[in-house]
Image (cartoon, rainbow, N blue to C red):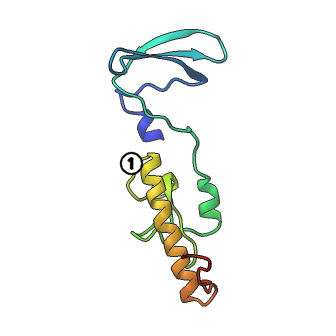
Amino acid sequence: MEETRKKPNIEFILDSIVTEIRGRDRVESVVVKNKVTGEEKELKVDGIFIEIGSEPPRELFEAIGLETDSMGNVVVDEWMRTSMPGIFAAGDCTSMWPGFRQVVTAAAMGAVAAYSAYTYLQEKGLYKPKPLTGLK
């Protein structure tokens, strides 16, 4: 986050909500209202990305002994395995694909992590899949 704050072409607008999206055939601007002062202003934009604006619990990652990168994100491999066997991570809290903080990549990573956890549990004998019944 601190690296992003230092970039001259990025403006942080805090305590605000988007109240209106304007444009013809494409997004041209948004109206933003400050929740504290009530002040509204229009911002010229080329597009919109919706994010929840929360930070992963990086202190927790370090406290339980997960390897983290210089930004405090959990280091994972291509199967979303962390430095601790049996612990998997996915989405914005990981070191994987740092430029793609989007729902679609987080969902894909979640699918990989789920498959990896399933495989891990099977290999350790901790989960035995039940056969599907009732299918015709």
Picture residue at 49% right of the left edge, 51% below the top: 92
Q: Check the image and name the residue furthest to the front.
A: 136
Does any portion of residue 83 appear in the rendered image? no
Label count reads 1
Residue 23 vs residue 6, the one in the foreground: 23
Q: Which SS class for mark 1?
A: loop
Q: Residue at x 56, y 39 (%)?
A: 52
Q: Residues within 10 Å of mark 1 (few under 14, many from 20)?
A: few
Left or right? Give the position of 58 relative to 81.
Answer: right
- Quadrant of the rendered structure where residue 131 is? bottom right
Compared to residue 133, the image places residue 64 above or below, namely: above
Which residue bears the numbered disc 1?
A: 100
Which percent across, then down, holds residue 53?
55, 38
Q: Residue at x 41, y 70 (%)?
A: 77
Going by the numbered disc 1, the residue's amino acid type is Phe
Is residue 77 in sight in this rendering?
Answer: yes
Q: Is residue 2 above or below residue 42?
A: below
Q: Position of residue 46 (x, y in %)?
A: 33, 24
Q: In this image, 18 relative to 64: left or right? A: left
Depicted 128 relative to depicted 117: above or below: below
Residue situated furthest bottom in the rendering: 125
Q: Is residue 122 left or right of residue 100?
A: right
Residue 112 placement (x, y as % from top left)? 46, 67
Q: Position of residue 102 (x, y in %)?
A: 44, 45
